[in-house]
Image (cartoon, rainbow, N blue to C red):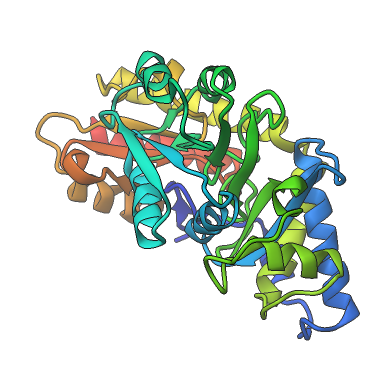
Amino acid sequence: MKQILLNPGPVTLSQRVRDALQGQDLCHREIEFSNLQGNIRQKILATYALDNKTWASVLLTGSGTAAVEAMLVSCIPPGGKILILENGVYGERMTKIAVAHNIDHEKLSTGWDQVISLKKLDKALDGSRYSHVAIVHHETTTGRLNDISAISEVCRKHGVRVLMDGVSSFGGENIDFEKWELDACAATANKCLHGVPGTAFVVARRVLFQTTHPAKSVYLDLAQYLVKQDLGETPFTQSVQCFYAFDEAMNEFLEQGGWQARHKLFSNRMSKVQKKLLSFGIKPLIELSESSCVLNTFQLPVGKVYQHLHDELKSLGFIIYAGQGHFSTKVFRLSLMGAISENDMSRLLEALTKTLR
């Protein structure tokens, strides 16, 4: 039985992306790879109509976390300090990265199911000693879509720039790179863009790398990647087959209408699932108006154990996702990215009816 992935990445692949993995063996020092890499970089910037003179997309072989770590170790200037906004696992992961690399930082923590307080942020930034605020756009711990527009207004007031984890929103949600005071955004191929795991990237302002300073990492130093990739080269071996798949995924993404089309697609799918679950009295963990279209978190029905629900749906061809931390026994998460057909959606709604009635 075909398994449809309803977890927040990796996703169910389209056949054309799967077929792209069969591309010819290719040395990463050859012109063919240089062209492949350059094409992907251009398509990433095209996603949000970004100017190549101001912005650069830098490709990495690694997970979304690798991109976030590369962003944090590469985009903070000497003497810079960051304020990390935490309201879920991935905000907290940025703090772990800062600790591991001895990055000067403080954190502003909020409950996982809570909105980040703009008043507390304003107070924390008063008389600002920070160069950047680091924030997760779509916090998949709960599905919350943090209001980066409002947060960036507070940052602008204090002359602070934003570093954003866009791993689970890039390609599926609106990202306003200019108005949101973004210096960089970390993302990955295998979520809203429907590529395969193994390729990640950072979109960053070129001005960040005009002044050289000692690297804080060997493998994750974006400055050296940017220099090499602008020359059509790469400092390290890249995952060639994953690049093939990502290039084809980007072709498919742009042909289908880009992030606006994906946002509409994900929203339409999620509204059907929301309606079905609400008919059984199953409520979302947070207000749906505060959630991303990419993932929603729902409260487990009374008397229902997550593992049982998971196994029942898996037997019917669908893989759901558990809650994290103190929510692990209270909720389940659903994401509707990937190559999911109308027939798959009908089967999913039937499967939910069968397991929940």
- Residue 223 percent location from the top left of the image: 69, 62
Q: Is residue 344 left or right of residue 111?
A: right
- Residue 85's place in the image compared with 100, above or below, is above
Total of numbered circles in the picture?
A: 0
Quadrant the C terminus occupies: top left
Instruction: Name the one closer to the observer, 54 or 238.
Output: 54
Task: Specify the quadrant of the image occupied by residue 106.
Answer: top left
Q: Is residue 316 left or right of residue 310?
A: right
- Residue 84 percent location from the top left of the image: 40, 38
- Residue 243 percent location from the top left of the image: 71, 68
Residue situated furthest left in the rendering: 303
Q: Is residue 98 left or right of residue 191?
A: left
- Residue 38's place in the image compared with 339, above or below, is below
Residue situated furthest top in the rendering: 119
Residue at x-position 47% and y-position 36%: 135
Residue at x-position 24% and y-position 33%: 356
Quadrant the N terminus occupies: bottom left
- Residue 353 percent location from the top left of the image: 32, 32
Q: Can the viewer see residue 92 in this picture?
A: yes
Residue at x-position 52% and y-position 65%: 216
- Residue 61's place in the image compared with 313, above or below, is below
Task: Specify the quadrant of the image occupied by residue 34.
Answer: bottom right
Q: Is residue 38 left or right of residue 146?
A: right
Instruction: Name the one closer to the observer, 100 or 12.
Output: 100
Q: Can the viewer see residue 351 in this picture?
A: no
Residue at x-position 47% and y-position 43%: 81
Instruction: Name the one closer to the observer, 144 or 212.
Output: 212
